[in-house]
Image (cartoon, rainbow, N blue to C red):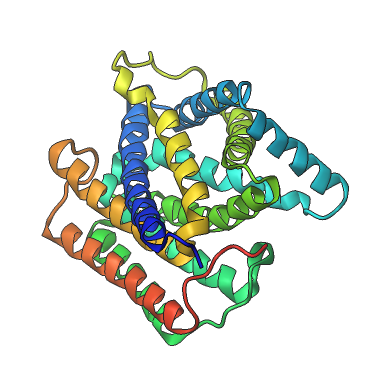
Amino acid sequence: MSSHPRHEQWRTVAAIAATVVAGFGVATQHRVNGELGQRLDDGFTAALISFGSGWLILMAILAFSPVGQRGFRALGEELRAGRLAWWVTLGGLGGALLVLSQGLVAGILGVAIFTIATVTGQTISGMLADATGFAGARKKPVTTPRVIGALLTLAAVVVAVGPQLGGNVPFAAVLLPLLAGLGIGLQQALNGRVRQVSHSALAATTLNFTVGTAALALAAIVHLAISGLPDVPPANPLLYIGGAVGAIFIAIQVITVGRIGVLVLGLCLVAGQLAGALIYDLIAPIGTPTTATTAIAVALTFAGVAIAGLGRRRRGGATRPSA
């Protein structure tokens, strides 16, 4: 036990607050990249700009960080020795899919509905990851509260967009953020494992952005070869902050998960995302407008995640990534 329990308590409170802020950052990235994709009329290029700019920022920081450089060397040693599976390093693909879906459909769905869909995917993938022991984590049974929670988040998607499917909102526009949410749930587990092995949040975050940027660059090249150049880039500098925001909230998640656990991390991220989504849809809307139905769907989403999380805690407490 720590000799300074009050200090530890305040550190935990600070980690929780930082994670809620990170969730708000996720909603901010949804909003920014959604409009950038609309302005460029090219979600692929918007995604590459966002993820690539975050990668450049992290590489510049890494160049002056001995701790981050040691982390990368440690990762290389673990991979060469076979103690770390190569696929554990691919967490950035989940982030790449999220950013791509932002550029393609967040401008159609609006921030709140887009967030509901991604959170639903995260809830389902978290349940599957626990059931299978993904990335070396302890296996946990699929409990009734977790199933109820997942069903509530799915119900929230139906409430939010059901009446509009096939009309203003094509089915594919909802499916893409759902799949991205599935990827993000797995990404969190993979990045947590990489952080443990490297002992460096910077190394884990930079690896995440390196993998995601490479994947998006390939996708953008193929898309440009087929569809041609995007529209003239917008002049508003705020539309280019998505990469910096992403680098910050990924780093916060990587740092705080070790103190507050995966369960509380997920709940805090959801709280920040849903609050941010409603705020952005009210003060700076894009896509489908926020209605009372959207607010009900947001409440269902948070209730679903909370029920799933509380059920998980009763089975043995908040989990942490396995060593």
Whether residue 306 appears in this view of the structure is: yes
Rendered-image quadrant of the C terminus: bottom right
Percent across and percent down for residue 302 are: 29, 65
Judge from the rendering whether residue 2 lies leftward or rightward of residue 323; answer left or right. Answer: left
Percent across and percent down for residue 94 are: 55, 48
Identity of the residue drawn at 55% across and 28% down: 58
Judge from the rendering whether residue 270 lies leftward or rightward of residue 208; answer left or right. Answer: left
Residue at the far bottom: name it. 144
Residue at the far front: name it. 3
Judge from the rendering whether residue 211 lies leftward or rightward of residue 278; answer left or right. Answer: right
Total residue callouts? 0
Whether residue 168 appears in this view of the structure is: no
Q: Using the image, determine if residue 195 lies above or below residue 155.
A: above
Identity of the residue drawn at 46% across and 55% down: 181
Q: Quadrant of residue 212?
A: top right
Judge from the rendering whether residue 69 lies leftward or rightward of residue 5; answer left or right. Answer: right
> Of residues 241 and 43, which is closer to you in this image?
241
Residue at the far right: name it. 81
Identity of the residue drawn at 14% across and 38% down: 283
> Of residues 174 and 251, which is closer to you in this image?
251
Q: Using the image, determine if residue 151 lies above or below residue 51.
A: below
Identity of the residue drawn at 57% across and 72% down: 130
Q: Quadrant of residue 222?
A: top right
> Of residues 315 and 115, which is closer to you in this image?
315
Percent across and percent down for residue 320 are: 55, 65
Q: Using the image, determine if residue 120 lies above or below residue 214.
A: below
Percent across and percent down for residue 26 are: 37, 44
> Of residues 99 and 107, which is closer to you in this image?
99
